[in-house]
Image (tube, grey):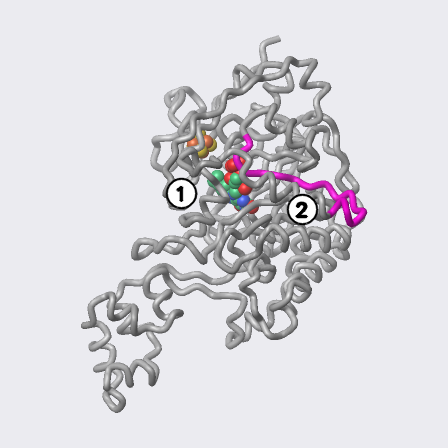
Amino acid sequence: MWHPPENIKHPLPDVRWPTEAEAAASRWFSPVTIGPVTLEQRTWVPAMVPWRATEDGFVTEDVLDWYARFAEGRPGAIVVEATGVRDIPSGPLLRIGHDRFIPGLQRLVETVRRAGEGHTRLFIQIIDFLAIKRRPEKEKFIRRFLDVNDRYRAALGLAAAPEAEVRERLLSLPDPELDRLLDERDRESLRYGFRERVTDMDRPHIRELPKVLPGIFAEAAARAEKAGFDGVELHYAHAYTMASFLSALNDRPDGYGGPREHRVRLPLEVYRAVRAAVSNRCVVGCRYLADETIAGGNRPEDAAWFGVEFARSGMDFLSVSRGGKFEDAQPPAVGWAAYPYTGPSGYECMPTVLSDRQGPFGRNVPAVGQIRQAVREAGLSTPIVVSGGIHGFDQAEGILERDEADIVAAARQSLADPDWFRKVRLGRGGEVRRCVFTNVCEALDQKHLQVTCQLWGRLGLGEPGVKLSRDGRRRLVPPRWEPAP
Ligand SMILES: Cc1cc2nc3c(=O)[nH]c(=O)nc-3n(C[C@H](O)[C@H](O)[C@H](O)COP(=O)(O)O)c2cc1C
Ligand code: SF4
């Protein structure tokens, strides 16, 4: 994984844990209303893909175990991982693009309600993504996939030569020369694998996205409500379709790209379609980026503007992430697809302790504070969820105290210890297993391996009933924690 060139190793900050009485009286453990529901606490587990669904997108026993384990920590809310809205094969990622997925999702909701004894609200993140191919072998790409155009022929002085000869000449070029000759898109397809963009207007299904996506998201949201979820989180963040519409790099000429007013159009249309498809008991919010952190991308000023538009349109919450883009990702190995968390923007999304002067803890907070301020100045009270390097009680409490957010979320710290909210609430913060922010979990995610944490993956492997990962080397959920009476 990329890390800032300053290469400063940040120690885990010292933390102070509250007594039970202090936690009970704190902001973080106080209720908050989001749209039609109330969270018991302002604690939140954001979406994390654990790679436990079946190859065709169904809920498995391992998925149930995973979310039950998070529910035992009784956070205010859990957001189920990015779940595909289309009915298309997408590997072992959860899907919600057809009614046949509803029974499994229903079991997931029931499992979480039981494990959390009704204390935790459950949302599901719904996502659309575009096609991405694995990085091809050079020979295969040049001999089979590359479109041999007149510019290449002219550059090689082979205007009238047979196509096969042009391909062989291209293949014989040293890499730097080949890279100079290929146009940007072909070079990317060779070095990263082909990736569709929302701006590929020559592709009919990309042109049609604004026509089809509102309906697809709306149907998915209706299924989520039918399955019993408290609401949906529209995935407008990171490297995926809806974030790409919002992106400052989106220059579609059809009224859905260019100025901010046009870029926000589809996200608002999707939201309205979703809202119309669910009852007024269903929460509808979105996750989007405070800062794309890429050259030419959206900055916090843009995000603040979008935040006001989303809040004004009636969204129930805004969960704000950061970075995680394809544009600055590192080239994958041959046979692998690009992963949007390998470059500087990926670092911004899931920062590690190997950092710059600012360090990994709460990097997203100032930008999220800016969004919240803009939303409040517009006279809107939409709750704002912050995430990114949250690791402790005082840190979370400070964010709430300074009005930088209304809900404080923790992904990796909750993965390291799903009981941590409960431990802190009970005045037993000293027992929290603290995330070390070195991203072993993220490396597993990148390889599409079942995500576990280095701090508990190897504990009690031989104990009865412990389910193991496919490689047999890691347990799939952390050992249970029983609060002493
Ligand atoms: C294994 C893993 C999977 C993730 N999957 C998702 C996802 O499905 N959707 C999403 O919006 N963010 C996803 N994220 C990002 C987290 O929700 C969160 O924004 C990020 O880890 C930063 O928060 P943290 O510092 O509390 O971990 C994932 C993170 C990890 C570590
Ligand atoms: S593997 Fe565990 S300790 Fe390491 S970053 Fe992930 S959650 Fe934290």
State whether residue 151 is above or below residue 446: below
Secondary structure at badge 2 equals: helix
Residue at 73 percent across and 19 percent down: it is 25
In the rendered view of the protein, which quadrant contains the N terminus?
Answer: top left
Percent position of residue 52, x then y: 48, 41
Relative depth, front residue between 186 and 99: 186
Indicate which disc residue 371 carries.
2
Q: Residues within 10 Å of mark 1 (few under 14, many from 20)?
A: some
Amino acid at the residue labelled 1: Pro
* Image-quarter location of ligand 2: top left
Q: Identify the magenta region.
A: 375-390
Percent position of residue 74, x then y: 64, 27
Secondary structure at badge 1 equals: loop
Q: Quadrant of residue 264?
A: bottom right
Marks 2 and 1 sit apart, C-alpha to C-alpha, by: 25 Å
Residue at 60 percent across and 35 percent down: it is 409
Q: Residues within 10 Å of mark 2 (few under 14, many from 20)?
A: many
Q: Can residue 467 be seen here?
A: no
Indicate which disc residue 4 carries.
1
Is residue 43 found left or right of 377 in the rendered image? left
